[in-house]
Amino acid sequence: MDKPLILVTNDDSIVSPGIRTLIEVMKEIGHVAVVAPDSPQSGMGHAITINNTLHLDKVLLDKDLEYEYSCSGTPVDCVKMAVHEILKRKPDLCVSGINHGSNSSINVIYSGTMSAAVEAGIEGIPAIGFSHLDYGWDTDFEPVKKYVKKIALEVLQNGLPDGIVLNVNFPKADKGEIKGMKVCRQAKAMWVEEFDKRINPQGKEYYWLTGEFINQDKGHDTDEYALENGFVSVVPVQFDLTAHHAIQTLNNWDL
Amino acid sequence: MDKPLILVTNDDSIVSPGIRTLIEVMKEIGHVAVVAPDSPQSGMGHAITINNTLHLDKVLLDKDLEYEYSCSGTPVDCVKMAVHEILKRKPDLCVSGINHGSNSSINVIYSGTMSAAVEAGIEGIPAIGFSHLDYGWDTDFEPVKKYVKKIALEVLQNGLPDGIVLNVNFPKADKGEIKGMKVCRQAKAMWVEEFDKRINPQGKEYYWLTGEFINQDKGHDTDEYALENGFVSVVPVQFDLTAHHAIQTLNNWDL
């Protein structure tokens, strides 16, 4: 069988240690094409660029790669440009990350990393987003490499159920050696925002978004529980957002 | 009973005819607070501003309003700032829109309008996103006003099931008089991108994102079908993205 074509992207930008690690692991499995943002795009969610132009630049960070491009757009733009403008055929797999910081629980919805994976899923490409709870650029990715490879190989072998992508998070190093992987549901948690209000040199107020992550979901089947206990969390994520179970309730309304 | 506090936002910016219509209708129901983007934010999805500062400006477009602010951020930022920085109590309802353009089907995932509603839902606020398939700024919103009011009143009276917000779309005017409302599921459709490649005055290539909307979902229970037939579509949207039905399949993998 021919080697699979693997599209690699992220949201921390093409020079981040996380994506370079992911490229390194994927090169052991297949032909790798990289299209990733030219600047940090964390928190961009599923944003696309429609009111501005997009730019692509050939990058030469890895001499083994035929396709390595930085893009001025969002992570979702990167996937669209890769599939519809750059690559000659549809990739067999799309991997996004490894993100520097958590995309577990409700973070999935704000995450550029996961939105890139979701966009690939919408395009019919099996896709996985990887994130590490240690957000520093000096994070040691060595212990997670074998899990990245194993999950990618499983997805290449089994495919994914229709309409599903995977959200994979790695626990913090202070949890000790990784204990294994757990398939989980997204914990019901949220951010409680606090805006850091400051005054600029011209005397005008401005704000920085900050906040505290609050998890009140005590379930043992959640991603937060798995990560807290030193496991890799694997959550199947869907992009049909319809709450099918609520349709009957609404049909009883006087609409 | 006291009049409800209603937060109004959108993604087309605070001066768009769609949000001014929504404000007008909500003033008939409750106390209205407006926090909306100071510039167009279409296609921003669930983006938040974490690598940049945020600015708020008091706006005086409507003398009836105690709270009317423009914000430099995304629609999701607007909701966060309204709830955690501006308002003294949690709103009883959040409405977003009326968007100039469709947010039916897969568009929900790219939509700043809907992401603002989802963010309010995450905060525990009943929320509705409204969108009109006619995207022109000269769209006649008169025929949709009574539906906007009716749905808002229903949500205020009944609340919404836990973890759900509503995605409401209005059909194009060329479908004739609106025939009523239908509770629907999101159609399985997608955009097939074509990038419009151009050359800038310096000789460098750049791109505009364009594309064609392809709906291969022939179901009569979809939002696309309702809209095509002159009905208002009402889709319950959830923000627990876990594909619960896929967990068992993944548990059979050798992870």
Image (spheres, coloured by chain):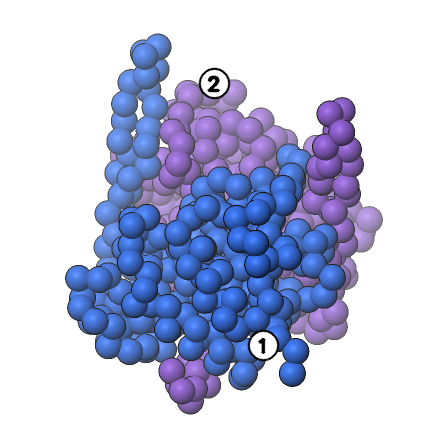
Chain colours: A purple, B blue
Q: Nearer the viewer, residue A220 or B92?
A: B92
Which part of the image, by quadrant, shows the C terminus of chain A?
A: bottom left
Q: Which mark is residue B25?
A: none
Residue at the image point whose x is 63% and y is 45% from the top? B58
Give amino acid for label 2: Leu
Give amino acid for label 1: Asp
Q: Is residue B176 found left or right of B160 in the rendered image? A: left
Which-is-in-front pick, marks 1 and 2? 1
Q: Position of residue A50 (x, y in %)?
A: 38, 39
Q: Can see residue B55?
A: yes
Label 1 – label 2 distance at C-alpha? 49 Å
**Vertical placement of B230 versus B194: above or below?**
below
Q: Nearer the viewer, residue B38 or A253?
A: B38
Label 1: chain letter: B
Q: Quadrant of residue A16?
A: top right
Element class at badge 2: loop
Residue at the image point whose x is 66% and y is 51% from the top? B81
Label 2: chain letter: A
Residue tagged 1: B162
Q: Can see residue A231?
A: no
Residue at the image point whose x is 29% and y is 39% from the top? B210
Q: Position of residue B93 (x, y in %)?
A: 57, 69
Q: Nearer the viewer, residue B251 or A167?
A: A167
Residue tagged 2: A60
- Do the residues bearing badges 1 and 2 touch, measured as CB atoms within 8 Å? no
Q: Position of residue A254 (x, y in %)?
A: 40, 87
Circle 1 packing at 10 Å, graded few (<14), some (14-19), many (20+), is few
**Vertical placement of B8 versus A32: above or below?**
below
The answer as to whether the residues below labels 1 and 2 share one chain is: no
Q: Quadrant of residue A69?
A: top left
